[in-house]
Amino acid sequence: KEKAMLGVAFDGDGDRIAFIDEKGNLVNSSLITVLIAKDILAKKPGSLILYSVPMSKIIPDEIEKIGGRTMKARVGHSFIKQKAMEFNSPFGGELSGHYYFTETNYCESSFFVLIKILEIIEREKKPFSDIIKHYQKYFNSPEINFNVKNKTEIIEHLKQNYTSKGGVLEEIDGATVSFPDWWFNVRPSNTENLLRLNVEAKNKELMEQKINELKHKIINYDK
């Protein structure tokens, strides 16, 4: 309606920020992390970029392609800030829309993120959707929550089930199991009595198939 170049939303206390492009489509926070990280790496080559476990594989793909380094961190500001200070990382992002900079002593500053994105749009002289189009290579589920009794047992069940099929296991935060064309992460929430699931795949059909498969396993195991 307004022919705006982008849309921006802040959460109630201002420490999270979300973007939509000029077409009204939500921009995944993994793509915002890639944009800002590439901007920082142009000034600080070889730097370490942090990102939370449920975020897209596009982050290491793009950052390592230009000589940057990446490291996964547990979800939660205390965990990612600790890693940032320990490894002297100039920037990190979370799926939830929290972003961390050395310039702000790793305190979340949504307006700082907004300024960075506006600078990138101004420099690129392209619509926001065109800037991010190059990075939209994977299909990501929203975070899917389950109110289950046996979170630890379910995570263990999924680990055993999928590693027996050749999946590669990481246990930085819950369990992440990766295959060549898809991966999932399942973890207990830090703030609520929930089990959280994220799935990413190379195409939409595979993502939807794996979401349904994992939902079925989680719900049936909890009965």
Image: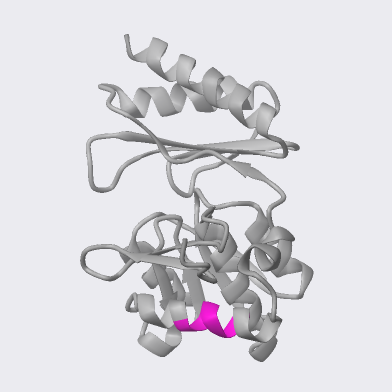
- Residue 42 makes an appearance in the image: yes
Q: Check the image and report above or below for 5 versus 198.
A: below
Majority secondary structure of magenta residues:
helix
Which picture quadrant has residue 112? bottom left
Q: Check the image and report above or below for 58 versus 165.
A: below
Estimate the x, y position of residue 145 in percent, counting from the top left: 35, 33
Judge from the rendering whether residue 78 lies leftward or rightward of residue 131; answer left or right.
left
Estimate the x, y position of residue 82 in percent, counting from the top left: 38, 71
Estimate the x, y position of residue 55 in percent, counting from the top left: 53, 52
The residue shown at (45%, 66%) is: 7
Judge from the rendering whether residue 80 lies leftward or rightward of residue 198; answer left or right.
left
Q: Residue furthest right?
A: 65
Read off the magenta span: 115-120
Front residue of 216 and 173? 216
- Residue 178 makes an appearance in the image: no
Q: How many marks?
A: 0
Estimate the x, y position of residue 165 in percent, counting from the top left: 68, 22
Q: Check the image and report above or below for 185 versus 73.
A: above
State yes or no: residue 138 in magenta: no
The residue shown at (32%, 78%) is: 107
Image quarter of the C terminus: top left
Front residue of 88 and 112? 112
- Colouring method of the image: one colour
Q: Check the image and report above or below for 197 versus 57.
A: above
The residue shown at (59%, 61%) is: 31
The residue shown at (36%, 63%) is: 79
Front residue of 125 and 216? 125
